[in-house]
Amino acid sequence: MHIPDAFIPIGQSAIYWLIALVFIVLALKWARNELDEEKIPLVAVLAAGIFAIQAFNLPVGMGTSGHLVGGALVAILLGSPYAAVFILTLVLLVQGVVFGDGGITTMGANIINMGVIGGFVGYYTFTGLRNAVKNTYLSAAVAAWFACFVSALAASVEMWLAGTFPLVPGLIAMGTYHAAIGIIEAVLTAGAIYLIASARPDLMKTSTGAAA
């Protein structure tokens, strides 16, 4: 899902960067207000974990790949979609600058797809479902799957707008792969929340509420 430099024209990339910067500023404001000594270790662990899970890429075709995202997990655990923007931006910066995974010019698009869309879709799907079904783990699993799937579709649309590949084949390829990958993300997200709720229920009270 990491879009390389050559896949999007500079003009379009600049627009995505401008949009991403708005959310980055809001994410930094969230970090200033919300991060404390209790949450910083969790942020570090989440960033390292997301970096690791995104390292496993499956070739989708047409020059792109599929992988887990992690935006929903971060947003749910830390209680804000801006937390996902904050951590995913840090992860994508290291991946792009140090390891060449994802472009520099297209990093704005990647931040939007994985941090903004992944975080906001994941968080609000989770909160809506939890209020409806009263089950934290089921809600987290569905939210993580949906966030992964929608992020992939957004990347497909961006690459179609860039003229990189046709819309329908792109949506089918990215959507099919990430519908399957999303199942893994759903299980990992629900499992991570269960483990943290079991080991540190105090953290869950400040983010997802009492686990059920």
Image (spheres, rainbow, N blue to C red):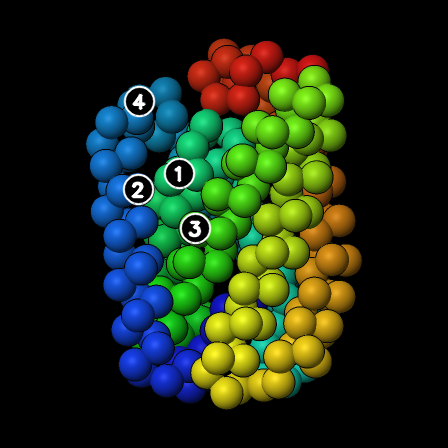
Residue 25 at what x, y percent from top left? 23, 47
Q: What is the C-alpha distance between the residues marked 4 and 3?
A: 25 Å
Label 4 sits on what residue type? Answer: Glu
Residue mark closest to the camera, 1 vs 4: 1
- Around disc 3, counting alpha carbons within 10 Å, would you say few (fewer than 14), some (14 to 19), or many (20 or more)? many
Lower position in the chain sequence, tag 1 or tag 4: 4
- When the figure is inspected, residue 148 is found, relative to residue 61, above or below; the finding is above
Residue 51 at what x, y percent from top left? 49, 53
Lower position in the chain sequence, tag 2 or tag 4: 2
Q: Quadrant of the C terminus?
A: top right
**Is there CB contact under 8 Å for labels 2 and 4?**
no
Q: Secondary structure at mark 3?
A: helix
- Along the line of sight, which residue is nearer the eye, 40 or 85? 85
Quick check: 44 left or right of 140?
A: left
- Around disc 4, counting alpha carbons within 10 Å, would you say few (fewer than 14), some (14 to 19), or many (20 or more)? few
Circle 2 residue: 27
